[in-house]
Amino acid sequence: MATIVQSCRIEKDAADLLSKQAKRRQLEVSTLSSLYLKEKAREEEFPGIGFRDSIAGREAYLLGQRVAVWEVLDVYREAKTIFRTADHFGWPDYMVKCALAYARQFPEEIAGQRKAEVSE
């Protein structure tokens, strides 16, 4: 994917924390900054979606739940309706709709996360 260079100013405390986290993950600070910025932008665009580490790397999931977006998509494909999918998880419909909207926007990412988790 093509990238562009952008810069921003952050407080020293935040820069120190970011540097510490990048070192722990064995990443460049710029790489981790880019990842965090992308994830935060997506969280703003899709309220209810968060990101966490998984076997396959970073993974989209539903905030407050232990369920990844790809898992919701799998259940939806089996259940065939938002109502039945929500009932399966014991959630309100809007949580399933949120996961499905994210999966529609980023299908390759979700397919990759599913493949990595299921084939491990």
Image (tube, grey):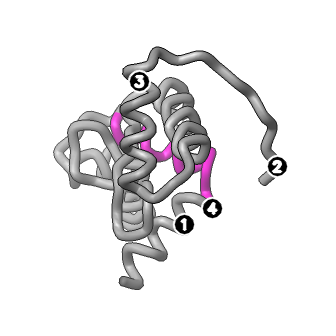
Whether pointer 4 and pointer 1 mark residues with C-beta atoms closer than 8 Å, the reply is yes
The residue wearing badge 2 is 2
Query: Which residue does the image show at 41% across and 84% down from the upper left?
Result: 119
Image quadrant in which you'd find residue 19: top left
Q: Is residue 79 above or below residue 87?
A: below
Please report the bounds of the magenta region as a residue range.
Answer: 95-107
The residue wearing badge 4 is 108
Query: Which residue does the image show at 79% across and 44% down from the upper left?
Result: 3
Q: Is residue 30 above or below residue 55?
A: above
Q: Amino acid at mark 4?
A: Glu
The residue wearing badge 1 is 111
Give the Cα distance between marks 4 and 3. 32 Å
Q: Amino acid at mark 3?
A: Ala
Picture coordinates of residue 18, whole percent (x, y): 43, 35
Q: Amino acid at mark 1?
A: Ala
Viewer-nearest of labels 2 and 4?
A: 2
Q: Residues within 10 Å of mark 2 (few under 14, many from 20)?
A: few
